Image (cartoon, helix red, strand yellow):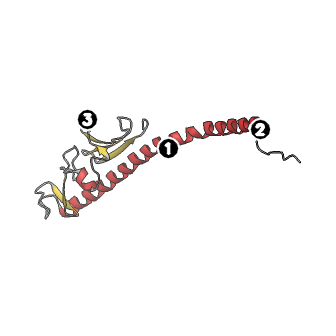
Amino acid sequence: MRIRQGGFTLIELVIVIVILGLLAATALPRFINITQDARIASVQGVAGGLRGGLSLAKAQALVSGSAGNPCGGGAGTVCMDGIAVAVNASSYPTGGASGSGIENAMQGLDGYLFAYPTVNRTTAFRPVNGGSATCQALYDADVGSVTVTSGGC
């Protein structure tokens, strides 16, 4: 009595490998866009935090004035959770990389996440990994506005 071995033929294995290759080729571009989507979401999240910090600092300046505070910041500052936040004459947090204005109002934004170059009197918050002039949140302290550019993320 002869026992016949069962299994897949070479042609069947090649066909399965080709089908898996086609599936991988169609699915791979979707996974590549995840990085871009993450950068866009990161920039939009920081823009939301900037808007929140801006609103809270302005409200605090309007309620308590900016002629000094218990945080020890002196004139032109407001106290937010025990941290002195520098404000300008319009009661908006100051910009720039000084670490005393909008950066203090954000409370938790650190240099490991975003860089702070100042461009044309606005402070640019760019992701350290993949940030550019076309992937950033811009804070303009003169008018208290936040804009997002995410075309090049």
Which residue corresponds to the image point at 28% horizontal and 48% vertical from the top-left?
144
Q: Residue at x 26, y 39 (%)?
A: 117
Q: Secondary structure at mark 1?
A: helix
Residue visible at 25% across and 35% down in the picture = 120
Q: Which residue is mark 3?
A: 120
SS under mark 2: loop
Task: Quote the CA–CA distance across marks 2 and 1.
Answer: 38 Å
Q: Nearer the viewer, residue 67 or 6?
A: 6
Residue placed most toward the observer, 113 or 136: 113
Picture quarter with the C terminus: top left
Type of residue at label 3? Asn
Residue 92 is at least partly visible in this image? no
The amino acid type found where label 1 is placed reads Ile
CB within 8 Å, label 2 to label 1: no
Measure the C-alpha gap from mark 3 to mark 1: 32 Å
Badge 3 or badge 1: first in the primary sequence: 1
Question: Total number of numbered labels?
Answer: 3
The residue to which callout 2 is attached is 9
Q: Horizontal and vertical percent for residue 8? A: 76, 42
Image x and y of residue 62, in percent: 22, 60
Mark 3 crowd level (few <14, some 14–19, many ≥20, 10 Å Cα):
few
- Residue type, numbered disc 2: Thr
- Quick check: can you spot residue 143? yes
Say whether disc 2 or disc 1 marks the residue closer to the N-terminus.
Answer: 2
Residue at screen point 84% across, 47% down:
3
Q: Which residue bears the numbered disc 1? A: 34
